[in-house]
Image (tube, rainbow, N blue to C red):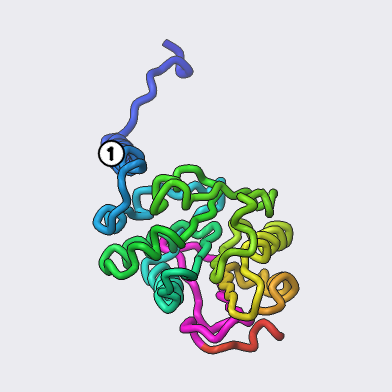
Amino acid sequence: MSDSEEEITLSASTLAALQEFRSEQETRQEAFNKLYSAAETKFDAATAAKKSIADFQEDWNLSQFWYSDDTQAVLARELLEDIAAGDDEEFPLRVAIISAPSVYSMALKLFGTNPRYERLFRDNFYLLEFDARFEHLAATPDRFVHYDFNKPVAVPPALKGTFDRVLVDPPFLSEECQSKAAITARYLLRPGQDSRVIVCTGERMKDTIKRVYPMTRMTTFRPEHGNGLSNEFRCYASYTSNLGNWTYEDEN
């Protein structure tokens, strides 16, 4: 047998690492299958609270990097405070989360422990996301909207101008992606001074953000990611929020 024909063997440590990886993949797939089978069931708080972003592996080809738990919680609580303030049976506040499924997941968890938010969350929280897996994370299937930033207004026409709060984290740190996501945000926001937008993105996009979101200012809040993403992130808001004070860094 020639050298090229020799059977390839793996060390014990490599085999153990491979087995651990396969086991982790199987665990994730099992959790995802449970979400899939439950997607058509009646929404309730207990079920919602069990859903987790940890059940979805990041797809780096789609530039998916989940926020740290602390960052998810800060952003989710900001949105939950706003929707609770609009507890009006006839005109409840509506929230759209664009390309930030980890924030949506955390909002589900926080909401699941407080029945007060059940109707508001079920009816008025929307997730706009390219990755179709997250249809099974949504509170109800019709609250998931497939979203491609390359087609910024290719969303159901009935959603135009109906959202009071929009949180957006464009998937790519490019001027094209940021500009098109901004078109989507403006398309969704309800006309008027009370509508609010939060933008989270890389620090190097600050000049683009100033141009496409002239109503926002950089805050002192610094979003962080759970898997050590090294890019410095910044958070912008169009209103005086709980996300820290205004900073003048974006004016330098």
Instruction: Confirm whether the magenta stretch covers residue 238.
Output: yes
Q: Which amino acid does label 1 sit on?
A: Ser
- 165 above or below 238? above
**Residue drawn at (53%, 49%) of the image:** 145
Secondary structure beneath label 1: helix
Residue 232 in view here: no
**Residue drawn at (28%, 58%) of the image:** 45
Instruction: Using the rendered view, name the quadrant where residue 23 is placed.
Output: top left
Q: In this view, does 9 lie to the left or right of 149?
A: left
Q: Quadrant of the C terminus?
A: bottom right
Q: In which quarter of the image is the N terminus?
A: top left
Q: In this view, does 221 lie to the left or right of 108?
A: right
- 229 above or below 36? below
Percent x, y of residue 179:
72, 62
Percent x, y of residue 249:
64, 85
Report the span colored magenta. 217-244
Q: What residue would you read off at disc 1?
A: 23
- Please count the marks in the image: 1
Percent x, y of residue 131:
51, 45
Magenta stretch, overall SS? loop
**Residue drawn at (60%, 60%) of the image:** 170
